[in-house]
Each structure stands twice: as C-alpha cells, then as structure tokens.
Amino acid sequence: RKVNACVRRSLHDSVQAAKDTFFIEAPGNDKLTFTNRLTDDDMQIFAQVFMTPSVFLQRLDLSYNHLTDVGAMQLAQTILAADNTRRLTSFNLRSNSIGPDGCFAICQAVVMCQTLRRLNMSQNPLGREGGLLVVDLLRNSPDLLELHLEDTEADIDVLVATAEALLNPELHLKVCNLQNPRIITLQEDHTVHLGRMLRVNTHLSEINLGKIKMRDEGVRQLVSFLLENKTLRILDLRCNELGAVGAKHIGVLLGSDCQLSHLNLSGNRIGEQCNVTGATAIAQALLNNRMLRHLDLDHNALCGGALKVLADAVDQNSMLETIALFNNQWDQPSSYKFHQILSDRARVLPLRADFVTSEVDLRIDICKVNNFVIS
C-alpha cells in the first residue's frame, strides 16, 4: 500500500516547525490522497506507529476518509487513550462512516482530554444515540470551544439536549453547528428551546441553524429571545422555510441594538411570488444598523423591486462589506443601482458581492463571481 502523502507531509512540517508537539492532517479529499483514503486497517498501523509519541499530538484531522466504528474504536483504545491525549486541541472526523458505537468509544476516550478545544463529527451517521453521546461529552467539557454536528442524522431530542446543556454558564462553547438534523414534526419546539438558550448564553459567538425546518412563527420566537442576546456575532439560518413574514421579524432584530456581524438567510423564500415586504423590512433595518458586515440573501426568489429596495438601503449603509444576491430575479433598475454602488469609489468600505456588473449596449448584465466566500 502507498504511503499516505498527507501523513508524510504533516510529519515533515511538524519536524520543520521544531516544536515539542506534532500534528497529523490527512483529509481524504486532498488532491494527494483522493484515491488513497485511510481505512480501518490503516488505524491498526496508526496505533502501532503513533501510540507512544501520541502524548505530543496536538491536532488530528482524519476527515473525508473511510473510517467506520471499527477504526474509531481502534483510535479510541490506542492513540486517544486517557494518558495519550495530554496536548490534543483539535480532532476532526468529519465525513466518515462512524455510527453510535464508534461515537461512544471516541467520547469515552476524549472526555478526559482537558486540552481539547475543537471537535468535528459532522457528516457521520451518528443518529439520535450518537448525538446524545456527544451532548454528554459537551456537558463534561467546559473548555470545549467548537462543536460541529452538521448532518449527523440527529433528531429533535439532540437539538433540545444541546440547548439544555448550553444553559450551563460553566460551558465556554463559542461555535456550535447543528445544521440539517432529522426533523419530522411540523411543530417548532426545538426553536423555542434554542431561543431560550440564546437568551441567556453569554459565550456563544456563532451558531449554525441551517435546515432545521424553521418557519415564520419559529423565527418570530427566536428573534424575541435574541433581542436580549448581546454576544452572538454569526447567525446562520440558511435553507429554512422563512417567508416575507419571517423576514419582517429578522428586520426587527437588525433594527434593534443587534450585535450580529454575519447573517446568512440564503435558500429561504423571502421574495416568493414577487413579495417585496420582507426585503423592505430588512432594507429599513439596514438604514440604521451599523454592526452588520456580511449579509447573504442568495436563492430567495427576490424580484427586481425587492432587489432595488435592498440596493437603496445598501447604498446608504456604509458599514456593510459583503453581500450575496446573485441567484435572484434581476431586472434593469436593480442591476443599474448595484452597478452604481459597486462603482462608487467614494464609499467608505468597498462593497464585495457574489456578482459583478458590466454595461453592454446600454444595459447592465449581472455575472456570477466563482468561488465567492463571504468573509
């Protein structure tokens, strides 16, 4: 079997750094290892080679590989054993095939690791059982700063348990990703629990609540709690079911003494059926908001009138730095207004967008910017 190029590179870079720790970053989606991903059999070799020096291991990234419960257990019993994780700060198992049994072994192993700051178990089929195990780990890890549970087949019980755990002021979690749980109820009890947590939590600065089937009533309740939160900076509500009414509630939040700097509302239905009231509410809030730096309204079926209203507000808001709007329903008046904004060199902070404008034959064309990332 070929030597994994990422493992070799990590060890070489660790030696070059000349520190008393080392790291292993071997993501399976790297171009060097795309056809040579790590498997459960490789974990046996890992155990033999790295078990002794693992006391100096600082970061372990095995994301996008082919590890199952067997490989996870092998890791837990060797490299992650209690005496071997004295310096581990980051552990990434994203996008493997680890289920509840492997998750149990991992949680049992790292719960005693007082240095762990970042744990990523996203895109593993943990289910309800595995999700609750990670929540128990969170309860016993007051120094954990980042937890990623995106797309783990977790259910509403996991969301509620996470919200309940984060009511504890002794937990210092700053980043929480709960995107795409398996929600089968039309009621929005989970939104209420998450909102009550956010009302009193003073440590979270970023939360991802994408694809949790939040509707207009759910966002109304969430906003009522967020009005009392002054520490959250990044709110991600992508791919929910927010309409114009929900956008009005978001406008109330942005128009208050809101500390959000990043807001992601992409993939909702704010402008459905040429409704401009939601966009108008957000635009009016932007006129007085001086904290928001990055706004994503992509894929919201915003019509030309809605885009024009937003453009007028963005023109007067000199603090907004980036905006995403490309996948909406553009017309010439809205295109022309943004053409003026993007060409305005007198603007205090230049506006970055996921599109560029160009004037061709007395009309404005909108072109997508590839690989655009909102900072």
Image (spheres, rainbow, N blue to C red):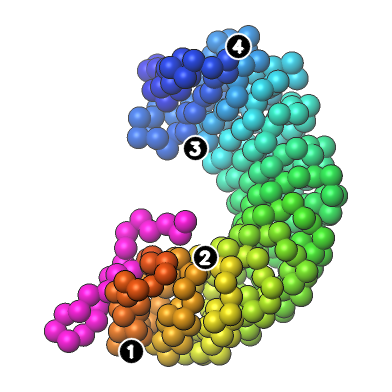
Pointer 3: what residue? 64
**Relative to residue 337, is residue 232 depicted above or below?**
above
Disc sitting over residue 53 in the figure: 4
Give the alpha-carbon distance from disc 4 to disc 2, as whole Å: 44 Å
- Quadrant showing the N terminus: top left
Q: Which residues are magenta?
A: 355-375
Question: Would residue 151 be seen by someone viewing this image from the given angle?
Answer: yes
Pointer 2: what residue? 293
Pointer 2 with pointer 1, Cβ within 8 A: no
For image coordinates 55% across by 78% down, the residue present is: 286
Question: Would residue 127 be seen by someone viewing this image from the given angle?
Answer: no
Q: Neighbour class for label 2 at 10 Å: few (<14), some, many (≥20)?
A: many
For image coordinates 60% across by 45% down, the residue present is: 122
For image coordinates 62% across by 65% down, the residue present is: 260
Give the alpha-carbon distance from disc 3 to disc 4, as whole Å: 24 Å
Mark nearer the N terminus (1 vs 3): 3
The mark closer to the camera, 2 or 3, is 2
Give the alpha-carbon distance from disc 2 to disc 3, as whole Å: 32 Å
User: Which amino acid does the dot numbered 3 rest on?
Assistant: Tyr
**367 is within the stretch colored magenta:** yes
Q: Is residue 127 left or right of residue 352?
A: right
How many marks overall?
4
Pointer 1: what residue? 333
Residue closer to the observer: 13 or 124: 13
Q: Neighbour class for label 3 at 10 Å: few (<14), some, many (≥20)?
A: many
For image coordinates 49% across by 77% down, the residue present is: 317
**Relative to residue 223, is residue 74 depicted above or below?**
above
